[in-house]
Amino acid sequence: MSGFLGPLDPGGRVPPRQQTLVAAFLISAHGALARQFAFTLPLKLDAAWQTELNAQFYRETEIVSLLMRATSWVPDIALAQMVASWETAWLPTPIEGIADRPLAQAVHLATLAHAVHAGIRPAALLPVDSNAQDPFVMALRRIEFESGRLLQAQILFLKGAELAPYRDAVSATLEKRHTGVRKLWRETLESIGIDLPRSE
Amino acid sequence: MPFLSHGSYRIRYELDGPADAPAFVLVNGLTQYSELWAAYREALLARGFRVATFDLLGQGASDKPTLFISQDDQVTALHLLIGELGDGPIFLSGISFGGLIALRYAIEHGEHIAGLVPMSCFAELSPQLLLIGNALRTGLILGGTGYLQDLLLPMNLSDQWLKPLLDKLDSVKRQGWLVNDVYALQNLMESFLDFQPLTPRLSAISVPTMILNGEFDFLTPRHLHETLRVEIPNSALVIIPKAYHAFTLEKGALTADLLARFADDVLAGRWQGNQAVWVAPDEPGGELAPFPAGYDHLRAIPVRRTQP
């Protein structure tokens, strides 16, 4: 087990099976966010903050599109079961302490997005000698960089005044989301020989 | 890798040296991690000390709280670590953000320590420090951890240190980039949003205190250390020649030597702070020189001090 992707091929590229599993996980997570932002996004914006929903929807869609094209895909029979477990994990779950349903739904989406954008660092898996000109390598770097920016909307909302009365519920929900997302990510990486430090 | 528990959070620490020896506890600055004290560990162990280091909550291998990290929690984590050290004399030192946590510990739990060494430290956010801190936070948000490191490196280290590393800065930054997460660093920086100045509380620090300040520290310049010297009764200010904010990285041998000599002096009853101002030697083992009498140590040019 290693903490990084590889061994790389002579051209500094990540093995196709590792590319496939990593890309499939990221497409599942960011695709779920794209769908959920799409459902939340009104046809006509009536508040300034909703412009961020539009941005989040398109950035998530861009990540999915990028991975579809940048990945060297190979068939993997284990993938169907893994995808099913991932997709189940992204579904909304009740949030204890917030009875207001629209607000609870917003907290669900923000905490899931925070966990994906903050807790998943695909570029940190790249060894130092990975080929910077390879599209998959570039895609992982770009996704991590964009995630850091997308994350700001979640931080602003979750730390904001509207949720101040629910701070404990929000913090508990977010910690739980991080734990769940990291567990799935770690299990995915373990299946391709990568060992992440356990934080859950 | 041992961990302490604070609520649901785990704090990674390292402890080396004989249990009955006087101990040094070293507290990291922002973006740092425990391994950066390796040279200090080696030097202080060789001088007969026990050495304890840890990763602040939100950094390194310690847990990274997702939304809020309070400075109170960092003080509690430090208190837990010091609680592991037994009844022998304990010297506490911290750099920058870690120095601030050490100051707070000394104010709140001073009875547990024999001496304090704040390094590149501050007790309040001057307008410059506040605005620089805001700009660094914006840099982190817009450019990620790598960009924050790009800003900090030239600000905090000398040309002499940087020049041979210019073509391999990525490898210098890599470990810090790997172990630090944007959201956790942001939480640490945002722990200053409700920061209250420590200046009115500094006089509560009664232990011997050696304040270390780099001659060319741009981020936390001399006057911020002067606040500590004036307010902490048994203190002395030691200026590290040709040093910048991160002199603990650049001048490890000299700094470790100063730490050991300070602790030896305190344990031998020789330490006299007197709120004096000293200039450290260029090399370990050299003599400290008193700042020239009559000159103003807050100026960068030789100006005679005006009497208050």
Image (spheres, rainbow, N blue to C red):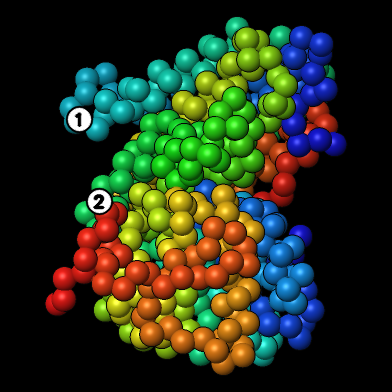
Say whether residue B252 is visible. Answer: yes
The residue depicted at 35 percent of the width and 49 percent of the height is B218
Q: Residues within 10 Å of mark 2 (few under 14, many from 20)?
A: few
> Given the image, on which type of amino acid does mark 1 rest?
Ala
Which of the 4 image quadrants contains residue B141?
top left
- Residue B247 percent across, percent down from the top left: 51, 54
Name the side, left or right, on which A81 lies relative to A121: right
Examine the rendered structure and indicate whether residue B218 appears above or below residue B237. above
User: Toward the viewer: B140 or A196?
Assistant: B140
In this view, the residue farthest toward the bottom is B269
- Residue A18 percent across, percent down from the top left: 76, 21
User: Toward the viewer: A58 or B231?
Assistant: B231
Tags 2 and 1 on a common chain: no
Name the side, left or right, on which B66 lies relative to B305: right
> Given the image, on which type of amino acid does mark 2 rest?
Gln
Which of the 4 image quadrants contains residue B86?
bottom right
Examine the rendered structure and indicate whether residue A92 appears above or below residue B254. above
- The residue singled out by tag 2 in the image is B128
Q: Nearer the viewer, mark 2 or mark 1?
A: 2
Q: Provide the secondary structure element on which disc 1 rests.
A: loop
Q: Which mark is residue A48?
A: 1
Examine the rendered structure and indicate whether residue B10 appears above or below residue A156. below
The residue depicted at 75 percent of the width and 14 percent of the height is A12
